[in-house]
Structure formats: C-alpha cells, structure tokens
Amino acid sequence: MLCANIAVNGEGRLTFAGQDTTLLAQKFGTPLYLLDEDRIRENCRAYTQAFSRLFPAGSKVLYASKANAFRRIYGIVQEEGLGVDVVSGGEIYTAKAAGFDLKNAYFHGNNKTDDEICLAMDCGVGTFVVDGEDELSAVAAEAARRGIRQKILLRITPGIDPHTYEAVATGKVDSKFGVAIETGQAAELTKAALALPSVELYGFHCHVGSQVFGEDVFERGVAVMLEFMAEMREKLGFTAAALDLGGGFGVRYDEGDPLLDVGRKLESVSAVLHETCARLGYPVPAFLMEPGRAIVADAGLTLYTVGSVERITGYKNYVSVDGGMTDNPRYALYGALHTVLPAGKMNEARLLRCDVVGKCCESGDVIRPAADLPESTSRGDLLAVCTTGAYNYSMASNYNRVPRPPIVLLSGGRATLAVRRETPEDLIQFDQ
Ligand SMILES: *Cc1c(COP(=O)(O)O)cnc(C)c1O
C-alpha cells in the first residue's frame, strides 16, 4: 500500500487510520477530508528526532502551515515541538486563535502588506523572513516606530533548479521570491540589514522548491548557502547564527514514486553542513527546515461518492464524483497524480480504465486521469483519493458555489470534526 495507514478489512472495504471509510462516509457525508492525526504526529517526530540527533542546539523544525491550515493543526504541531511558517495575516490570525505561541512563528511571503506587518508585530511573531530591499525598509520602519528590534532572516535564492514542477520551483535566480546570490543583491541586502538598528539579522533562508526528490538538491543548497555566509563574514564581519533551508521533501502520491526516508536524508544534509562548516572554519549555525507536505500529505485521504459514469465507446470512460477541483486543484494546477481507490470494493478486479473527474464546469476539472476502477463502478459507490493532506483544503475554492468539505481528524480509533462542512448559507454570507 501507498502508506501504512491504508488497509483493507475483512469486508473488502478500505480502512484509513484503522477506521472503515464506508462508515466514516455514512456518518459525515461526502466529499469528506480525513486527516490521520497520529500520522501527522509520526511525521513531525521523524523530523524532530532526527533534528535533536543531527543538528546543534537552537535548531528547529517549522511546519509550513500553508500546506493545511485550520485551528486544530497549529495545536498539534505545537504539542510536537514544532514552530510554524506563516505566510499571511490569515494564517497568523488562525495560529493565534489556536493558542499557538507566535514567538515560534516565522513570517514568510514575497509581499507582506503594511497591515500584515503590523498584525505580525502586534501578535509578537518571532521572526520575519524578509524577501527584499523594499520589505526590509518597511519592516525596519515599523519596528523603529514601535521601539523594538525585530528578529529577521533574509530570503536568498541560491540559484538551484530542483527539477520539480515549474510552479513550485522557487530557488532559481529568476524566482519571484528572495534575492539572488548571483546578482550581488543578496550581499547588498545583507549589508543594508546590518546597518539598520531596528532589525536583528539572525541568519539566512532559502527554499529551493517543493516535491523534491533530486539526489543532492538539499545538500547543494546547504553548501551554496554556507559559501555565501562565509563570504558575508569575510566582507561584512557578520557571522550568521541560523540557516533555514526551507521545505520541499517529496512524498509518495503514486506507488511508482520513490519513498524518501526523512531520517536518512537529514543525515546526509547534516553531514554536508558539518563538513562545509569545517572546511570554511564557520561555526555550525542553528539549522531550520520548514516541511509542509512531508508533515501532512500522507495523513490525508478524501472520500467521494460516485455520480454519473459515462462510457464513450471506443474513446474514454469518465467517473464523476461529488467534489473536484474545488477541493483538490492539484491535477489542474500541476498535473499532480493522486492514487484513487474503490473504497467499498477493494477486492474487485480493476478493469475499468477511466478519468475520475469533478462536478465543475471545466474540462480541466480532473482528479486523476487514467485511473483503474472495478468494472461495476456505478452511482453511489465510494471512492477514496489518497495523499490529500497537503495543498487540498488549503487551496480549496467555492468555484461553481460548491461548499467546501469538512475535515475529520482520526486518532486512536476516534473521529472528530475539526472543520465543519460549509452550508449554502455560508456561501451567501458576504453577499450584500
Ligand atoms: C511552500 C514552502 C514550504 C513548504 O514546502 P513543502 O513542499 O510543502 O514542504 C516551506 N517554506 C517555504 C518558504 C515555502 O514557500
């Protein structure tokens, strides 16, 4: 199976986190986001345990909360000892409402508005990840006005192509994020930050991309960043206390995808960190990473009910479900392939090759092209789409005025509603 939390019971029905998906669908309705809380905690621990073994004091794992943000999840990752990466006023507000200690929050984004900068300072967000010259001035001015010294990291583009989808490759020189080492702008920004008394430069950040499996992408990232840091020490006399390598570890969406061992990968990254620091005579900085997908993706599974099944003889078959790009836009955005399973008929042969599509008025509303389902698939059947914990709910929309599904958290055999289903009244609540 794709992940250890997916299995089949004696009645040939799919179980997720040990619970019968058919019963969950009956209780909560479809479409339905399930999130395996125990798996989220295991994924957090894979990082935190490796971090305490491999990196110096002050190192920290931050959950990139854009992957899936709702109140309860901030509490879960906080209990596991993680900090968070937030990218908007909305995420800051949600984290605060969850009782998250925002000292442990890192505020990202390539265009933080003045209002968001103020909100973040009001809430005591610990660290700003400053994206460029213009933002540095804005953050420094607001901090000066308040008479505080705001801790910051500078976001640098190391010029590494992670060979992933273009839309999630963020570390290249021409990226909209951060400032490049290659153009000299990263050095200029460092110099500017050091000259401002209202900011405290803590270190540097980079994020090369998402869903990355490349052999040595992260190792090269560490080496390039350390070379840059050594150069800043030589030129400006500044020694950074922290290096934040961003997120991006790839996860398995398909049986054919590789399985990335987080502990082993972090050992290799740690080795490069320590070797490069030794070679450059640089004190080993506190090390930060910001996994999003790797924490929540395989903790998620979406249940749908099949509606119409259309067979275009000699061409193609379509199986339509009661959700679509509104709750899972990942195929439409990136061509991402999720595994689809016939949740109620797991023991039947899968001989119907079909596109699983949503109910939206868009031909691009595809959940999974060329899926294999039982020949008997028909209206009322339950389908499960796997690995939907990341970038599904957080990217969901109300296109076609489709209400968003609820999120049910599964833990220790219990199922609790974490986000309720939207209603038609919710859809018109802002209409004047
Ligand atoms: C998106 C993003 C992450 C998380 O990426 P994942 O692929 O979900 O791990 C971390 N840091 C930054 C700055 C990001 O933009």
Image (spheres, rainbow, N blue to C red):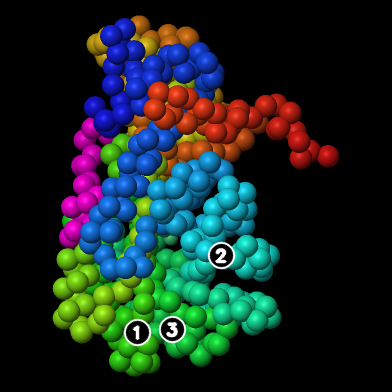
Question: Dot 3 corresponds to which residue?
Answer: 190
Percent x, y of residue 150: 55, 76
Mark 1–mark 3 CB contact (< 8 Å):
no
Q: Relative to 357, does residue 198 appear above or below in the rendering?
A: below
**Extreme residue in the right direction:** 432
Q: Quadrant of residue 158?
A: bottom left
Identify the secondary structure beneath mark 1.
loop
Label 2 is placed on what type of residue? Val
Identify the secondary structure beneath mark 3.
helix
Label 3 is placed on what type of residue? Thr
Question: Dot 2 corresponds to which residue?
Answer: 125
Question: Dot 1 corresponds to which residue?
Answer: 239
| Chain part drawn in magenta | 254-269
| Residue closer to the observer: 370 or 76 | 76
- Whole-angstrom CA distance, mark 1 to mark 2, is 23 Å
Label 1 is placed on what type of residue? Thr
N-terminal of the two: label 1 or label 3? Answer: 3
